[in-house]
Image (spheres, rainbow, N blue to C red):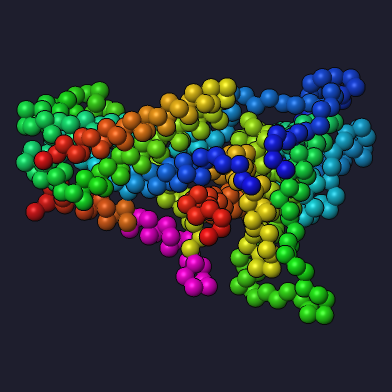
Amino acid sequence: MAGSHVYTDYHPRWLRRQVSTYWWLEKRDYFAFILREATCLFVGWFVAYLLLMVKAVVGGVGSYQPFLDWSATPWVLTLNVVSFLFMIYHAITFFVAAPQAMVVHVGRRRVPGNLVLAGHYVAWAAVSVIVSWLLLGA
Amino acid sequence: MIKRHPEPLLWMLFSAGGVMSAMFMPILLLLFGVAFPLGWLAAPSHERMLLVLGNPLVGLVLFGLCALSLFHWAHRFRHTLYDGLQIKHLNEVIAVLTYGAAIVGSVAAAYLLWQIP
Amino acid sequence: MRDHITLQVARYRPEQESEITFDEHEVPCPKDWVVLDGLNHIKDHVDGTLSYRWSCRMGICGSCGMTVNGEPKLTCATFLADYAPGPVRVEPLRNFPVIRDLIVDIDDFMRKLARVKPWIVRQAEKPLAEGEYLQTPDELDEYKQFSMCINCMLCYAACPIYGLDPKFIGPAVIALAQRYNYDSRDEGSADRMTVLSEHEGIWGCTFVGECTKVCPKHVDPAGAIQRYKLTAALDSMKSFFLPRGA
């Protein structure tokens, strides 16, 4: 039965309490949730930053070095430090949510949630090592 | 008959983007956003950057990272505006602006990465 | 330890007023008393007009859900001593219309629950002569957690999405749908998918996770919802690329 549903009967004497626009400030857990959602802003910022960097590399040494200098200016640096902290928060909250969202079966047995979580952290470490080696190593 | 709406696809893009950004961005942000500018580590030379970015696999992963992360941002931002600030009457406008920006950004990423020799 | 505690009880008398007011009462507070005991004390000895729902007083009927100091709780499972020195503020469950005092209307939930067919759906029933539907302990474990739901509505009170958009089908309904989806005896997943895949079905959820935190029976509705998102998304992709049930 699709279409709009009547969600409560109309009754003139029932009290309907409005949810405040600032509902997310009322409880610590709600605030932590909004903080987690806010990490997406910094994800978006960093995509822009990455693309600016690619553009600077494509433009040759003459544009690459100025980009590096620009990224060391106080505002950009502060923004990136804050972004890094939010990015860690995003990664941790995302990985912690994974076992709840993903129940993995091997044959008929369930893979314990801790293992799913550990797998994410291992992958995170591996990716970080590979990226570092690509950029810095050998 | 399920009335078609794009939420399932957008959610999958959001999830994929969440995983990609969670895996790759912390280290990239640490290096390019903090360590290199502060001089904790020497930034890679321009030559090395061209070498790394020029690798087709790297280019593909980077494109995937940028495009999916943009959709991750768009989906989460749209929902936060809807729920957090309750701007429901602007729902269609917000959807067009966010996913539109994600599409534009993905095209820009593809274009830029294509330019690398 | 003090032997009395102050209870601030919300009152709503629709014939007389249009807002909630608060009555304050001192109630005894032996260490084994719960908030429900305090309310019963008020009703029995002080003010018989106080109205509220309760039944089993042992956390299985789901009737006595209220907001205690801002948190959705079963009042039969919330000890007064934990709030010493008090006061303890008791209000009607959030996100539902208040009928009177601490009583809320939950018809919305009842209607939504019926829509997901919370029973074993079979294409064809086995004749009695063929015996019971057999199920192994492993098959039971797949859905047992979701079967623990006592319909207490604490999850709806905790969910900010439901508060902001009452069309959202809500945590308990989805968890109960999953209880049957994961039941090996059931064949009704497709029917439920029609309802759950709506815009205000599972897709309204942004995984705040509060529902799981407040659930007194550890059902984990948030987990049920996220797992179903993947199921529904994959099904949606399949039906898009391979229509006509290929």
Q: Quick check: C235 left or right of A71?
A: right
Q: Quick check: C69 left or right of C51?
A: left
Q: How many marks?
A: 0
User: Percent position (x, y) of residue B78?
Assistant: 48, 31
Q: Quick check: B51 left or right of C28?
A: left
Q: Residue C73 magenta-drawn?
A: no
Dividing the picture into quadrants, the one containing residue C82 is top right
Tell which of C207 and C198 is nearer to you: C198
Q: Is residue C144 visible?
A: no
Residue at 36%, 42% (x, y): give it: B68
Tell which of C61 and C183 is nearer to you: C183
Q: Quick check: A47 left or right of A134?
A: right
- Is B17 above or below relative to A55? below
Q: Residue furthest front?
A: C244
User: Percent position (x, y) of residue C44?
Assistant: 92, 40
Dividing the picture into quadrants, the one containing residue C203 is top right
Residue at 37%, 56% (x, y): give it: A120
Q: Quadrant of the C terminus of chain B?
A: top left
User: Percent position (x, y) of residue B103?
Assistant: 36, 33
Residue at 88%, 34% (x, y): give it: C50
Q: Is residue B48 visible?
A: yes
Q: Residue furthest top?
A: C17
User: Percent position (x, y) of residue A135?
Assistant: 15, 46
Give the magenta-colored segment's residue range: A105-122
- Is A28 above or below relative to C16? below
Residue at 57%, 22% (x, y): give it: B89
